[in-house]
Image (spheres, grey):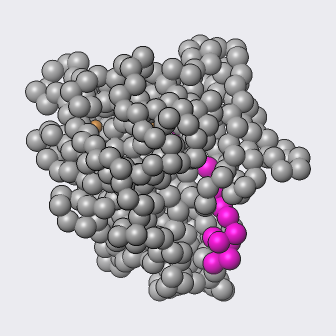
Amino acid sequence: TSTGNVDFYELTIRKATARILPGIATEVLTYDGHFPGPVIHARSGRRVLVRHRNGLDMPVSVHLHGASVPPSSDGNPMDVFGPGTSRTYVYTNRQPHASLWFHDHSHHMEAEHVYRGLSGTYLLTDALEQRLPLPKGRYDVPITIRDARFDEHGQLAYTMADRNRTTILANGAPTPSFEVAARKYRLRLLNGSNLRLFALNLSDGTPLIQIASDGGLLERPVAVPVLTLSPGERADVVVDFSRHPVGTRLVLTNSGPGRPEQVGKVLRFDVVRTADDPSRVPEVLRTLPPASALPAAAVTRHIELSMDEDGRPDPRGFINGQLYDPDRVDTTVAFGSSEIWNVTNTNKRVAHNFHLHLVQFRVLERGGRPAGPTEAGLKDTVRVMPGETVRLHVTFDGFRGEYVYHCHMLDHSAMGMMATFRVR
Ligand code: C2O
Ligand code: CU
Ligand code: CU
C-alpha cells in the first residue's frame, strides 16, 4: 500500500512448500510464501517501510544489501526479532538507482536461512535511470541464480561449506525455460548462492552486454564473453533475442569452477514471437568520477581474509586473524571520510569475497592492476580469489553507527569471517 511519500509492505516470514523438483513439495523458508523471494520496487527519495512478522520458531533479522540505511534498519546480526514479534524496517532510499536484494542476517544462522529461501529482490530506480531507453517493464527481469543440494526426499539439505550442491536453480527452478520475444531484454542477475562462483555465458557465443553492477549503471556498456559473479554480486545485462529467428533456443551456461556435474545449463530462453523494440542501450549510461578524481584517502587499511583449509569438520573463518565477535568493534572510521582498503585472501585454494554494509565503494585495483571495466562502477561486494589483493576506495557517508563487513560466501561469514565497523 502507498500513502503520500511512503510505500508500505507487510511480509510474514514463514515456512511454506514450493514445487521445485517435479512432483515434490519441498519445505522452504519464505518472505510471505514466495519462493523465490518477492520483488520490492522502490524509487530514490521515496521511503519504503517493510513490516516483517516473524512466523518462524527462531529469531531473524532482515538486511537490505547494498543500501544506505541507518543502523536501526540495517539488520545487524545481533539486532534480531523473535518468534511471534514484528519489526518495521525504514528504507529512506537516499541513494541512486541500484539492483539491491534483501536477506536474513541473524547471527550464525544467516547462511542456512538464506539457503532455505530467505532472500528477495529490491529494485531501486531513479529519474536518471528512467530517462534511459533501456528495456523496461516486462522486458526487465530479475533472475536469481543459486545452487542447492536435495536429499533423497527432495528436501533442501544444508550443511556448512557443502561442496555437493549440484543443482543450479534460476528463480527457484532447476534449468527453467523462459519464453521471450525477439527483442532486447534487461536481465538483472544476482548470484544468490552461499559459496558458488558463476561464470556465465550464452550458448550462441555472443557476449552478454553488461550495463550495471551492484551499485547501479556502469558508465558504459561492456561486452562480456564470460560473466563472473560471486555470491551477493549483481550484474544487469542486456540480451538481444532479435538476432535469432522465432523457434530458437538459447542457453545460459555456467562454466564456473566446480565438478563436471556442477557446470552446465542454468536456464533456457525460447524465442517464441516477434516484437517491436523501441529500447536501446546508450553508449553513455551515467558518469562517475574517475578513480583519479576520488576524494583523497585519509587512511589505508589492510584486511586479511583466511579460513582453515585442511578439511577439518568445523572450519573457522577469520578477518585479520580474528573470529567475529559481535561485542567487539574492529574498525572505527570518521563520518564523511574516504579510506583505502586493501583486502587480501591469504588462502591457497579457497575463494572469498568481501562485502561492506552501508556504502558503495570503488574497486581501484585487482592483483596490482587497474580493475577491469565490469568492476569500474559502484560496488558493494567484490570477489577476492586465492592469494589475491583488491584495493578499494571507500567513502563512509550516509549514516553514523555500527555496521558489519564480511565474506559474502555466507557459509564463511557464519563460520566467523565477519567484523564490525563503527562510523563516528
Ligand atoms: Cu548481503 Cu551482510 O550482507
Ligand atoms: Cu549487505
Ligand atoms: Cu569466504
Q: Which quarter of the figure has residue 206?
A: bottom left
Q: Is residue 123 magenta?
A: yes
The residue located at (61%, 55%) in the rendering is 95
Residue 227 in the image: state x and y as whole percent. 34, 64
- In the picture as drawn, the residue positioned furthest to the right comes out as 4
What residue is shown at x 54% (from left), y 84% (from top)?
Answer: 282
Ligand 3 shown in quarter? top left
Q: Residue 388 location, x and y as percent?
A: 17, 50
Please give the name of the residue rendered at 20% of the width and 43% of the height, measured from the top-left corner: 345
Foreground pick, 310 / 93? 93
In the rendered image, residue 68 lying in the magenta stretch gets the answer no
Is residue 423 shown above or below 57?
Answer: below
Q: Which image quadrant is residue 9 in?
A: top right
Residue 115's spot in the image, x, y percent? 44, 33
398 to 153, vertically: above or below: below
Q: Residue at the location (23% across, 59% down)?
A: 366
- Front-most of 183 and 399? 399
Instruction: Specify the segment rendered in magenta.
Output: 117-132
